[in-house]
Amino acid sequence: NISKFCEDLDKNLQKFNSDYKSKRFKNITMKRLEIIVAKEKLFFDWLKFKNKLGGQNKIPRLCNDRIFIEELIKLN
């Protein structure tokens, strides 16, 4: 189930990434990760929402804010 997977992923991220572990210590800097299951074709819906359908549009790879994820959550 998603809850167990989330717990296992968090533990392994802490095990292999000391920076992540220090940020997760007692949830002071970073809260426990959350996984949201996306509906089918959500990315397609997001591209449509952004008027980016078609093969010639570039998809952003990295972002320093939560704009893209908040849009995806809203459309989910």
Image (cartoon, rainbow, N blue to C red):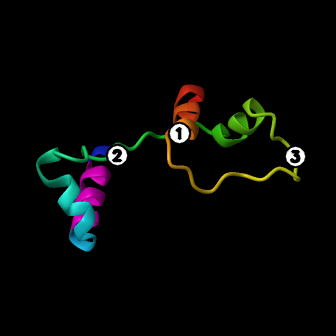
Residue ranking furthest to the left: 26
Q: Which residue is mark 1?
A: 69
* Kind of residue indicated by mark 2: Ile
Badge 1 crowding class, 10 Å Cα cut-off, few under 14, some 14 to 19, many 20 or more, is few
| Position above or below: 58 against 45 | below
In the image, taking residue 71 as reference, residue 45 lies left or right, namely: right
Q: Residue at x 14, y 54 (%)?
A: 25
Check if residue 12 falls in the magenta segment. yes
Badge 2 crowding class, 10 Å Cα cut-off, few under 14, some 14 to 19, many 20 or more, is few
Check if residue 43 falls in the magenta segment. no
Q: Residue at x 22, y 47 (%)?
A: 29
> How many labels, in total?
3
**In the rendering, which numbered label is found on residue 54?**
3
Between marks 2 and 1, how big is the CA–CA gap?
19 Å
Q: Residue at x 55, y 50 (%)?
A: 63
**In the rendering, which numbered label is found on residue 2?**
2
Residue 12 image position (x, y, % from top left): 26, 66
| Position above or below: 1 against 19 | above
Q: Which residues are magenta?
A: 4-14
Between marks 3 and 1, how big is the CA–CA gap?
21 Å
